[in-house]
Image (cartoon, rainbow, N blue to C red):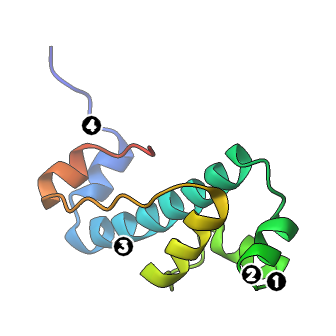
Amino acid sequence: MRKTNTYMDKLMENNIFRDRFDEEYQNLCIGEQIARARHQAHLTQHTLAKRIHTTKSAISRYESVDYDSYSLKLLKRIAMACGTDIKINFVGRRERNNSRTVS
């Protein structure tokens, strides 16, 4: 059976659009994982902020799709405060484009 192309499929054929989409998607995934780790640790944004010596508004920013200045040092501090570890995977572009899942 033949797959019906959606509007999104058409957009993803454009390399510039796909690259920008992938970048935004990665930011969304990082922010979502920060929020998930915080919730699983039963922490409020305020409590997490205190643990890593920043502000509640900064935590809100880190959990936002619009934030794109994550550093490994920052992510390690957040992970430690939430009682989690960081796992980084490098994947090929084809694999990344075909498997958009938040873990």
Where is 3 relative to 102, above or below?
above
User: Which residue is denoted by mark 1 in the rendering?
Assistant: 55
Along the horizontal axis of the image, is 43 left or right of 75? right
Kindly identify the amino acid type of the residue bearing the numbered disc 1: Thr
Q: Which mark is nearer the camera, 3 or 2?
A: 2
The picture quadrant where one finds residue 17 is bottom left
Where is 70 relative to 34, above or below?
below
Kindly identify the amino acid type of the residue bearing the numbered disc 3: Arg
User: Which residue is denoted by mark 4 in the rendering?
Assistant: 5
Along the horizontal axis of the image, is 16 left or right of 45? left
Give coordinates of residue 44: x percent, y percent: 84, 59
Marked residue nearer the N-terminal end (4 or 3) = 4
Q: Residues within 10 Å of mark 4 (few under 14, many from 20)?
A: few
User: Which residue is denoted by mark 2 in the rendering?
Assistant: 58
Visible in this render: residue 6? Answer: yes
Residue placed most toward the observer, 55 or 101? 55
Whole-angstrom CA distance, mark 4 to mark 3, is 20 Å
